Image (spheres, rainbow, N blue to C red):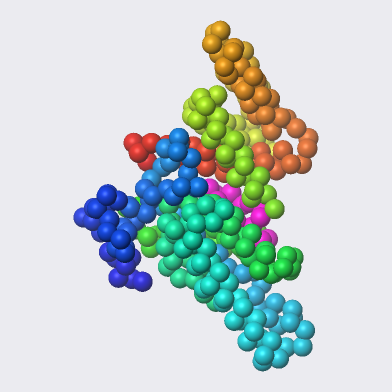
Amino acid sequence: HEEWLAMAEKEQFEDSLERQDEGDPKTFGQIAVTHPDGICNKNDQPAELLSLIKADVDNLGQIASRGLGTVTLSRYVTFARMTNLFFTGRLTRLMSQKTGSGDFSNIYTIFAGGDDLFLVSDWLTGHHFAGLLQEEFHRFTAGNPDVTLSAAVTVQKPRQPIRDGARRVEDALEEVKASGKNAVRIFDQMIPWDDFDATRDEAEYLANLLRTKIVSRAFLYRMLRYHRQYVRFNRGDKIDDALCMSHLLYDVKRNLGFPKNEKDTKATAPAKLAAGQHFVNLMTSCKMEEQKMMSRYSAPLMWALYLNRGKGDN
């Protein structure tokens, strides 16, 4: 794959998709600007960034040595072949077809086989594919709770060296392995697979608030600051960070609490009030679901901000 990587990194290659002939390999710049139907909302302006995806099966050695009952050559070979089939067969077919989950044809395989994979895509497709990867693996293993998968997705500009990105995504995957496995790391947050759908749904909710101008990008950036203060306060780092709650309440009251004019009252006031209550509940609720979400809230925030980020913001 080194010849393709070297070609894709060359800056003199034209990134315009209009000059792309069928069957030609894409440059990394071309991969970054492609957002397939079913993945990207037509009203979004997603950032032109790459995602690097790495994943592998957890505790494979223990499964092979202790999970097959009496270990025989035939059982071991069947286990190895079936694991390899998932990465070389099932996933590559998903990437070449449009499914109910979207179009994943903009994913390029660096390697996939054995018990792991390394893929390159536009950032949005890559993050959606991470969820599909877990769903398919869970189905492939018949829901066996002892056979799990860890993954990491990192984001970078298409002109950054891909080899540096490969090291970063490998380090991110190692952090998942060291932190309990059976999770994915996105936007520098560890997300257990059980919480991935909720994280993605929250990102879509925030993105929709931006699309409909219920909130501004500046408000979401302030939410990112409140999130970081919330995390530091709950770790006991700085008592002053407890002010994030009062700052959020003031921010919500000022920007989402009261309509500013008659047009706002009729068109967006109910949605603004609902959004304001949503953010306050996240920060102040005693429910475990809201607390878990708030502790990792930078992930859906960054997802939504990248979804509504024009070319000039890259």
Seen at 42% across and 68% down, the residue is: 110
Residue positioned most to the top: 262
Residue 238 in view = no
- Whether residue 181 is in magenta: the answer is yes
Q: Quadrant of the C terminus?
A: top left
Q: Nearer the viewer, residue 225 or 85?
A: 85
Q: Quick check: 220 left or right of 160? A: right
Query: Horizontally, is 21 left or right of 210 in the view?
Result: left
Q: Give residue 259's position: percent from left, percent from top.
A: 59, 12
Image spot of residue 97 (x, y percent) = 49, 61
Q: Residue furthest bottom?
A: 73
In the displayed structure, 205 sits above or below 59; it is above
Is residue 284 toward the left or the right of residue 252 in the image?
right
Residue 220 horizontal/vertical position (percent): 54, 31
Q: In this orientation, does residue 80 appear? A: yes
Quarter of the image where the N terminus is located = bottom left
Q: Is residue 63 magenta?
A: no
Q: Is residue 68 above or below residue 237?
A: below
Q: Residue at x 62, y 63 (%)?
A: 136
Q: How many marks?
A: 0
Relative to the observer, which residue lies in front, 55 or 225?
Answer: 55
* Residue at 27% from the left image edge and 59% from the top image edge: 21
Tell me where residue 191 appears, x and y as whole percent.
63, 51
Looking at the rendering, which quadrant does residue 247 occupy?
Answer: top right
For the record, the magenta segment spans 180-193
Front residue of 70/237: it is: 70
Residue at 65% x, 35% y: name it.
Answer: 230
Q: Identify the image quadrant of residue 80.
A: bottom right
